[in-house]
């Protein structure tokens, strides 16, 4: 299966422009989970911009 990087980038909401994983969702998810985080696309845009990718930030953002 080929990666749809360019297609994925069109829908990527991450604002961290220096990231080399942009559009490569499997690498992005693997990286963030290894850091005990979630990718930016899991957060509302105002929270994503804080770059706090923690599970706690996710729960706060979605009132869980």
Image (cartoon, rainbow, N blue to C red):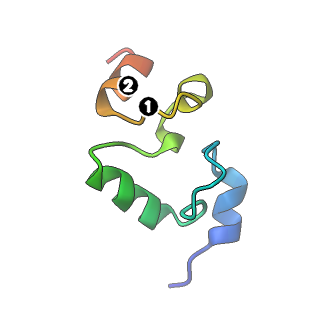
Rounded to the nearest angstrom, the CA distance separating label 1 from label 2 is 6 Å
**Who is closer to the viewer here, 60 or 50?**
50
Q: Earlier in the sequence, mark 1 or mark 2?
A: 1
Q: In this picture, is 45 found above or below 31?
A: above
Res 57 label? 2
Count neighbours of disc 2 (C-alpha within 10 A) and say few if under 14, some if 14 to 19, many if 20 or more: some
**Who is closer to the viewer here, 40 or 52?**
52
Residue found at the very far bottom of the displayed protein: 1
Q: Is residue 23 left or right of residue 34?
A: right
Q: Name the spot of residue 51 as percent of width and height, x first.
A: 50, 34
Q: Name the spot of residue 7 as percent of width and height, x first.
A: 69, 65
Q: Name the spot of residue 27 as percent of width and height, x first.
A: 43, 66
Disc 2, SS: helix
Q: Is residue 58 in view from this perspective?
A: yes
Count neighbours of disc 1 (C-alpha within 10 A) and say few if under 14, some if 14 to 19, many if 20 or more: some
Disc 1, SS: loop
Q: In this picture, is 3 found above or below 34?
A: below
Q: Name the spot of residue 15 as percent of width and height, x first.
A: 64, 42
Q: Name the residue under label 1.
A: 52
Q: In this view, does 16 lie to the left or right of 57?
A: right
Can you say which quadrant of the picture contains the C terminus? top left
Residue at point 53%, 25% (across, down)? 47
Residue found at the very far top of the displayed protein: 63
Residue at point 62%, 73% (across, down)? 4
**Who is closer to the viewer here, 63 or 28?**
28
Q: Is residue 50 left or right of residue 35?
A: right
Front of the two marks 1 and 2 = 1
Q: In this picture, is 4 found above or below 52?
A: below
Mark 2 and mark 1 in contact (Cβ < 8 Å)?
Answer: yes
Q: In which image quadrant can residue 58 be found?
A: top left
Q: Is residue 62 in view from this perspective?
A: no
């Amino acid at each position: 299966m080929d990666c749809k990087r360019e297609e994925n980038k069109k829908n990527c909401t991450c604002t961290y422009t220096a990231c080399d994983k942009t559009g490569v969702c499997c690498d992005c998810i693997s990286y963030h989970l290894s850091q005990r985080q979630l990718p930016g696309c899991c957060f509302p845009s105002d929270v994503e911009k804080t770059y706090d990718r923690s599970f706690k930030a996710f729960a706060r953002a979605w009132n869980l």
